Image (cartoon, rainbow, N blue to C red):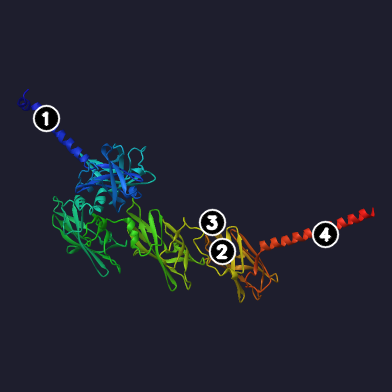
Amino acid sequence: MTPSIFLENQKYKSIINIILVYSIIITFFIDSSFSQNTVFVESSQIGRGILRPRGNECFVITPYHVVEKSSTILNVYGSNATKSSCELLQNAPYDLAILRLDQSGGQECAQWILPKSYSQILNRNNNGFLEITEKSGSVRIIDVNIIQKDVEYISISPTNSAMIIVKGWSGSALFVNDGMSKVYLGMLSDVDDEGVGTVLRADVMMLTLSTFFNGEITKTISDSKKNINGLAYQEDKQIKCTITDYEQNGQSFKVKYTLVNLNSSMTSIEASFPPHYSSLVDQEGYVYNGFSIKMGNKENNTNLIYNTPINCELTFNVGANVVDKIEKLNIHGYSQDFTFLNINKNVTDLNIENTLINPKKLELDVNRNLAQSIDKGVKCVINHFDQNGSKGNLYFTLTNTSSSQSKKEVSIPAHYCRFQDQSGLEFKGNAIYLGNTGNNAQLISGINLKCKIEFTIGIGNIEKLSYLNIKGYENNFEFFGIPIVETESQTLLSKKTISSNSASVILPPKENLLGELTEGDVNIKISKFEQIGNKAILTFFLTNKNNSQQVLDFSSRAYQTELKDRKNNTYNATYIEIGSGSERSELILNTPVQCFAEFEVGMNQIMDISYLKISGSTGDFEFNGKKGKLGQPESLKSKKAADTKTGIIVLGGALLFDAALKKIDKNKKNKDEKKN
């Protein structure tokens, strides 16, 4: 059959058409499937990543925690186990890192874009698959259910309950088959203990890295071309929002933007944006809610005519604060929601080193960095303590370090926070400011929130914070041995690293002590005894000496404290104060806690003490007094030592007496022998 005869045959024409259609479909699907190339990342940990070109170079986007502790040189493995060396170039918010591939890498680094309808694709799909590239170049596919979606993250779990998502898969790609297209939804960033994976949305990831890729990725997020007059833009439900400018005038901070209806099938769309629905986070981590909004010449709502931009202004009351940069802006309405990150109109240099935020460098922004502690994904950095009259102020910062939660709610009541000074006196917070709010705040990932706690400390002079506890409903931060005198080498010791030499004892000179005794884990030093009218007051210090127990609970009851004078009058304490005005306190290792016991002595004059007992939860401290004016050094001696000495004397006397009797018996025996 000649070609012409073959083509004229209708039966064969139909077959050819079917073949052509399937060829187009298969070609399209293959192109779509392999547009994003994933790789295996080998570092001090293992993970995965996705390739993306910029100019003539190829880069790997991977979670920062995978390569954070690596050396400079890293390796990645792509299809057919192709190995390439690379270097860590920069890290960015949302636990992202960029690796630069060696020029001779040989990886399949194809250009790719996010579809314009990314949000719609995500919204209409509840199933997808996780693509895990192995070192051998093979690819493992795990079917997953999409169980939760928000503006930044997607939560997934395996469709097969017998499967689990492994932490070593961080960086793996989440895809969904939408129609005949394979769509990249995002990167696996974390896995919880129950095997639920957290995926960073691809549009958030690309927006965060848009500066590095010179705006190429940003264009794919929006449905329209880049507006060179705009600082940033997004689209939701075919409404485009473009940030055009921001300015501050006194306490008023205005964000200017435009809204435009891009839906050609709807001439008019109603848009409603209550101002308090919107929020702004500045460079200090302070959060502000919207105060007022203008949409054209109306407030809160308007009709958006197709393809006609309308000018809008969103105003925030920022008080006395100066907003230099917008870390996060959320313009939220009844139907639309726009979220912007890292808006800074003063940045003109697109140099990689200057435009990507390095979370590690955020610590350098605080004036002082005395110590830090991390609890449940929140980092607490102590900056400074100052005293102004009877007021003490503690300054610190809180930072959300979680790679899986872009927002964390923290709540720290002021009265939950406390510190002990160099004398063991305890003070509780009476006011707290988390950023520009009270005791509740929202921590945005990677942004420091400046905080302050106010204490009433009276007329005392705080020389050291022997113990500091900043405690909230979810988080608990503890510090030990904080010197208030500021030096460059000033260091706070965390609970895990405190040592026996970490805190110096602040006490009267040893030669002025009235008595000293160690029972078990606790040392007691009697420093002062005085009588005022019918009250006798005993001052003493308790110190935890147990090197294996940094915090020791100690309690004592007033009626268990007993004193006898030389006339054998017995007095029980009517009041006892262990540290901070109660009968109980925590004894910090090697940190003396100042204590008081008060006795009702009536008309008697206590000239000296014959016996003193202070009973506590760790045992009894007992002293015998020696004759002499009360209050002179060493007027009290350990009863244990005295009893031991007495025992020795008694024993010695008994031995001498026994020896004398034996000598008498021996002499008598000798005399009897002579008589015989």
Binning the other alpha carbons within 10 Å of mark 1 as few (below 14), some (14 to 19) or many (20 upward) gives few
- Distance between the Cα atoms at labels 3 and 4? 50 Å
Q: Can you identify the residue that label 4 sits on?
A: 660
| Residue at 56% from the left image edge and 70% from the top image edge | 509
Residue at mark 1: 16
Q: Relative to 231, is 140 on the left or the right?
A: right
As drawn, 492 above or below 149: below
Q: Residue 183 location in percent, x, y?
A: 23, 43
Q: Quadrant of the N terminus?
A: top left
Mark earlier in primary sequence (1, 4): 1
Q: Are marks 4 and 2 in contact (CB under 8 Å)?
A: no
Position in image of residue 281 (x %, y %): 29, 60
Q: Which mark is residue 547?
A: 3
Query: Quick one: label 4, few (<14), some, or many (20+) residues within 10 Å?
Result: few
Dot 2 falls on a residue whose secondary structure is strand
Residue 612 against residue 494 in the figure, above or below: below
